Amino acid sequence: MSTPNNRRPDLSIDGSRLRRRFEELNEIGATDRGGVNRPALSDANKETRDTLVTWFCDAGLDVRIDEMGNIFARREGTDDRAPVLAGSHVDSQYNGGRYDGVVGVLGALEVVETLDDAGVETYRPVEVVVWTNEEGVRFQPDMLGSGVYTGQFDREYAYDRTDKSGDRFGDELERIGYRGETACVADDPYCYFELHVEQGPYLSERDLSVGVVEGVYGFSWLNARFTGAADHAGPTPMHLRTDALVATADVIQAVRRLTAATGTDLVGTVGSVDVSPNSINVIPEEVELTLDLRSYDNGTVDDAVEQIEREMAWAGEREGADWDLEEIMRVDAMPFDEDCTATVEAAAEAVGAEYMRMVSGAGHDANYLNEICPTSMIFVPSEGGVSHTEDEYTEWEDVVVGTDVLLQAMLAKSEER
Ligand SMILES: [Zn+2]
């Protein structure tokens, strides 16, 4: 049995092998403008899965597919202990980018092959995982594969999700041949790491290669409504109007003021506005809007929600409109496991990466995994903060450094007793 060994600075991944795989995988569903179009359970998604399974088998890994189509590929350890799990997803947005998800899956495979090349035996098994339907563009909600695995959703609930053309998730999973035999339940991983592109601008602005991710923002989603009075846009004098859209504009401005003024990490978005009757010569009678408020501090989100409630009341009063505000979803900020995060940080130092500790503004499969096992993430820069588009780009050297950090982190954890 090998002795615990948290550092193997002599080991590093093969960046050109990783790159070959990256380019080959991204030929599947490639778009003219340099992106990929591989929504969950599409034919292109199936082809991506088939290619990965072939590579996993070629690497001598033991592949199992669960009832949600999550793919696990295992490299045995010297002891039959809970495995160190790492991976991400390969479904994409419609006309999405080449890096989102792919980097984490291929990075984990590259780690395994690096261990093989160097003849390294680990105490714990190491597993690569590919989660189903992370993006949530074809089937909602997102992170459905890891959600069922970690007990957030029932399997049957997931199977009954339908896409816009009415195709059921369960039927599509069956159609592409990835409704596996293994029960989709958490089988007690020792820990989970996910390498992912940042999808925000912080690393690229600071010219850093790696983000050591210590947690994920919490958020509040709100539905709001103003009800005024429809009337003719010509004969109705300004002082007699109750315009629901003018009240809405006040609230949109308030979100900007609030996020600028608090000196916190609060971000806020009015992402959807539905005006009725939405006609050029009719005063808007009713407006439905959505608000998305996020921070790593739950109290900051609480305060923002209260402030928005006051802003709604003021705007309604000024305009003489009725108003209504409802919180439809609330998720607390989630710190990742401190020990896993420290492991990633030590790995970044061992590799000599330029890094910073940071918090993720977006959700990932890692959020759900953190509920059942110690978890942390490694970010690599998204140039210009751009993601979920065909223009998504990460410098290849940063992908290599990030994968080296993943290697050292997985090695360290795979030796823990
Ligand atoms: Zn992703």
Image: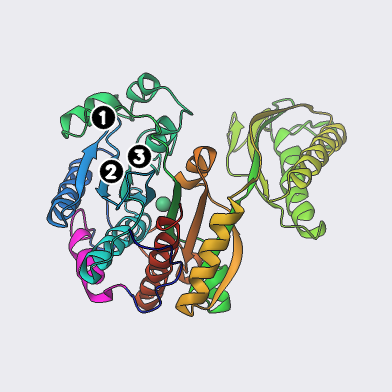
In the rendered structure, which disc, 3 or 1, sits on the residue that comes first in sequence?
3
Range drawn in magenta: 13-30
- Amino acid at circle 2: Phe
**Label placed on residue 72:** 2
The quarter of the image holding the N terminus is bottom left
Which residue is under mark 1?
Answer: 182
Q: How far apart are marks 1 and 2 (CA)?
A: 10 Å
Q: What element carries label 1?
A: loop
Callout 1–callout 2 Cβ contact below 8 Å: yes
Q: Is residue 21 shown in magenta?
A: yes
Residue position for label 3: 133
Counting residues from the start of the chain, the first of labels 3 and 2 encountered is 2
Neighbor class of circle 3 (other Cα within 10 Å; few <14, some 14-19, many 20+) is: many
Please state the horizontal and vertical placement of residue 296, each as a whole percent of the image. Answer: 68, 51
Mark 2 residue CB less than 8 A from any atom of ligand 1 = no
Say whether residue 244 is left or right of residue 237.
Answer: left
Q: Is mark 2 on a helix, strand or loop?
A: strand
Q: Earlier in the sequence, mark 1 or mark 2?
A: 2
Task: Determine contact: label 3, label 2, CB under 8 Å.
Answer: no
| Residue 211 x/y as whole percent | 53, 66
- At 30% across and 72% down in the image, what residue appears? 13
Circle 2 packing at 10 Å, graded few (<14), some (14-19), many (20+), is many
